[in-house]
Each structure stands twice: as C-alpha cells, then as structure tokens.
Image: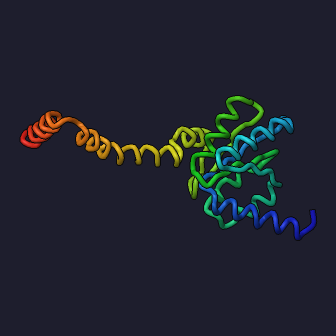
Amino acid sequence: MDRAQKEKVVEELGQIFESSGVVVVAHYEGLTVAEMQDLRARMRDAGGSVRVAKNRLAKIALDGKPCENIADFLTGMTVLSYSEDPVAAAKVVVQYAKDNDKLVILGGAMGETALDPAGVKAVSEMPSREELIASIVGCIGAPASNIAGAIGAPASNIASILSTIEEKAEAA
C-alpha cells in the first residue's frame, strides 16, 4: 500500500469515527471468510458496516476525533463495526459474539464515551431508533384512536364516557 492509499484509508476511517453513532472494536482471529461475510451481511441489514483496517492507520485516523479513547483497543486482529444508529452496530456484534465465540468484543465508543465490553452489551440492550419512534407514535396515536372509537360508538356510550371523565375531574 503506497502513501496515497494510506492517506485515503486514514481519511475514510476519520469520517467513520466522526459520523458514527457507535463504533465497536472486536478481535476476529479465527473467523472464516464465510463467517465474516455473515457478520457483514447482518450488519448491512441493520444499517451498519464492518471494516478491517490496519491498527496503525486507525490510530492515526482517531487522532483528534471524539472517540480517540478507543485507540487502546486497537491491538491484534481487530475489526471495526459501526453505524449511525447508536444501537444497531452494538446489537449485531453482541448477538454475533453470542453465536460465534471467535469474535471477542474489546470495547467501543459512543460519541466521546468509551465503552468496555459490558458497556457495549448494555448499549445493545437499548431500543433502536426505529423502536423508539414506533413507541412514541403509538403513545401519540392512542388518545386519538380512543376519541375516534368513542365518536363512532352509540350515544349512550358517549354519555357514559363523558360522565366518567367528569367524575375523574371532580376527584382530582
């Protein structure tokens, strides 16, 4: 790899470290090509990516970035898993590590916060961005659906609902 290629790799890695919601570092020694392709496919389905890079170039790319505290994890055969969603990459890597003991999670970073293996596991158990959006939409939509159901009900049901609301208001 000549100097120009190395500079390009450092620039790409720098953008990854800046724009990713989470970066997980793991050892992948002993993984077959098929297993690595499976990890890449799972990560792609979750909206993330997997990157293998020389540790020295990754350390250069980390210089001055918010997650530069993960430089200590970059020893041996390391793989970087990352995603914009702060939870997606961690979920995929933790699940894959459960299925395949050759992938060993070393740690990671979420913004400026360094994560140890337990921290990566804790992040993986958080709801994803899509799950949070769905729950918020559900909370917002629930009162509207209750009103719509009440409007469509016979008049006697409306009267009983209004009296219940009035009783609750008087009790409070």
x and y, in percent, of residue 33 in the image: 86, 39
Could you tell whether 110 is left or right of 139 in the image? right
x and y, in percent, of residue 169 in the image: 10, 43
Q: Quadrant of the C terminus?
A: top left
Q: Residue at x 30, y 46 (%)?
A: 144
Q: Residue at x 80, y 60 (%)?
A: 57
In the picture shown, does residue 52 fall above or below 91? Answer: below
Residue 105 quadrant: top right
Q: Residue at x 74, y 49 (%)?
A: 50
In the picture shown, does residue 119 fall above or below 97? Answer: below
- Count of numbered circles in the view: 0
Residue 32 quadrant: top right
Q: Quadrant of the N terminus?
A: bottom right
The colour scheme of the drawn protein is: rainbow
x and y, in percent, of residue 115 in the image: 60, 47
Q: Residue at x 52, y 49 (%)?
A: 129
Going by the picture, which residue comes out furthest to the left? 170
In the picture shown, does residue 78 fall above or below 57? Answer: above
Going by the picture, which residue comes out furthest to the right? 2
Could you tell whether 70 is left or right of 124 in the image? right
